[in-house]
Image: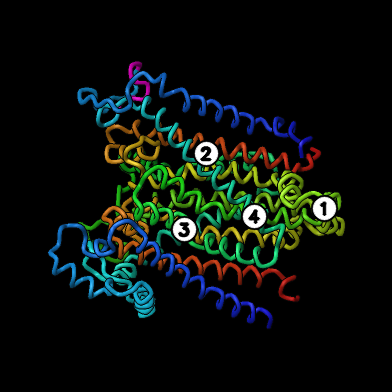
Amino acid sequence: MKLNKYVQGRLIQAVPLIFIVLTINFVLIHSAPGDPIHLLIGEGGASEELIEQTRAEFGLDKPLHIQYFSYIQNVLQLNLGYSLRYREDVLGLIMGRIPASFLLMGTSFVISSLIGILLGLYTGPRKDSLVDRLSVLVSILGYSLPIFFLGLILLTVFSLKLGWFPTQGMYNIRASYEGWNLVKDVLHHLFLPAMTYSAFQFALIFRVTRVKMQEVMKENYITTARAKGVIEKNVIFHHAVPNTLLPIITILGFNFSWLLAGSVLTETVFAWPGLGRLMFDAVSARDYPLLMGLFFVLSTFVIIINLLTDVVYRMVDPRVRLN
Amino acid sequence: MKSNWPIFFKNWVSVIGLGVLVLLLFIAIFGPILAPFDPENIEIGSRALPPSSEFWMGTDELGRDVFSRAVSGARVSMMVGIIAATISTFFGIVIGSLSGFFGGLLDHILMRITEVFMVIPQFFLAVVLVALFSASILNIIIAIAILTWPIIARLTRSEFLSLKSRQYVDAAFLSGASLPRIIFLEILPNALGPVIVAATLLVGRAMLTEAGLSFLGLGDPSRISLGVMLYQARPFVQFAWWAALFPGFLIFLAVLCTNLIGDGLNDVINPQLVEEK
């Protein structure tokens, strides 16, 4: 099947991309001002012997291309280095934060996509209705408000002033809830960050869905369907909606890969223990091994998501499948 | 395209956006000179005062007047946004037009490069770049420009691809016009439509990126920007929420305006048929 070939082709394309990311990583570390040694031991004035020892250990005294190859080798063996601040290996740290991040990202992605798509489909044929105007207003706000500002506002109003929601973290560390209580606690902590996170995604997907729906409703085949006597409900669901899917999938893919970028800001405001927050901590502590390891993992993730989006796109578009 | 300009003014939302943006620019340019207080003046006695007739936006945790700081901050934030967007647009247009016009190997190579940039999570790259190379206004502007030029390049290229087979191009070629003349004086003016829209939206995006970087502590500490103000106000938000509200609101306002203007411009280049009610 043509699709299989396409998937294989894209996978093959993805590999050089990942290598390019690694190369960029390597180049950045070595072109940044300051001796890379300091990126590993810090600048606290270590003894000459320690510096020499570390240099030899990490092969920093070898020529650049040999260093490059050992870096690539290390990464392929899943050795991403050792975090200075956390005293743990980078890969382990990252893996540990994934569940928390996925919970937040997943929830907001699902919520914003569902509401965005449904509202977009609903308001498409109903231009200038009250629902339409309100939703457009909300989406403009979501698109223009800086996420961290929105988060800060929600945090201040609903947590600090009104006390409806906890101010930080994923669960109450001191209370050590179990089972159902734990779930309730986590949900309680999850609400505000998820709302903040969803705003931008909602704005984007709602807008695209709505515009596409408006375009589709003006097409000839809609008029034909109505002329044939098809009831309005079927006109919408069987004739209009399937044609809106392609841009929606593109935007869903874009939103999904944006999730990581937005996570840094959202998780920082709400002190949510995820990958974004880890990146913030790495930056604040100038923990370069962690920072570069994170950069690599997250970039690879985005590359894979883009690939998936592309494949799904091709799968859904019958014109491409039959070609 | 030129005859469509009046359409922009029919959309009153975009016009308001333009008006407010002009007002903001005016404040950003002239404000710091007219501001009532010195933005850096630390007055421990007047710490964290709510807005009043003396301090229009209140004071922050170090007793500095928020209004004066916000005005200076707006200047820096908007400057970063506009300069970054301009640099990005300039490089994007040049690369995109050459790529689209000549095609072939040049096009292929340039497109691979843009693909790499578009795949890497942009905000992260910005964070990494600024964290490694130290946070200064210049580095932030450069980082933002590096990350966003591929978008403009792609747009320009696709416009060129469709325009280069038009008849006036052949006519120009046959009448002996030099290649640079054809590219930049014949085709480019017609390709600029979507590019201008994208560039406008880019200004807003650049401002948001700068604010985001500053909020994470990667802003230029020697300059006041709206993002830096938010960063400093965050620990005290419970007691001096106005020190965070006003800068944040100004960022929002400026970005909102660029988005509305961009939308209006979009209507200019793609006039939608008005529906009969």
CA gap between label 4 and label 2 equals 20 Å
Image marks 4 and 2: residues in contact by CB distance under 8 Å: no
Residue A168 or residue A178, whichever sits in front: A168
The region drawn magenta spans B53-59
Which mark identifies residue B209?
none
Q: In which quarter of the image is the N terminus of chain A?
A: bottom right
CA gap between label 3 and label 1 equals 48 Å
> Do discs 1 and 2 share a chain?
yes
> Do discs 4 and 2 share a chain?
yes
Q: Can residue A233 be seen in this view?
A: yes
- The residue pinned by badge 2 equals B82
- The residue pinned by badge 3 equals A259
Residue A205 or residue A52, whichever sits in front: A52
Q: Earlier in the sequence, mark 4 or mark 2?
A: 2
The residue at the point 35 percent across, 39 percent down is B228
- The residue pinned by badge 1 equals B173
Residue reaching furthest top?
Answer: B53
Q: What residue type is labelled 1?
A: Phe
Instruction: Say if B104 sits above or below B237 in the image.
Output: below
Q: Which of marks 4 and 1 is nearer the N terminus?
A: 4
Residue B26, x across and y down, in percent: 51, 25
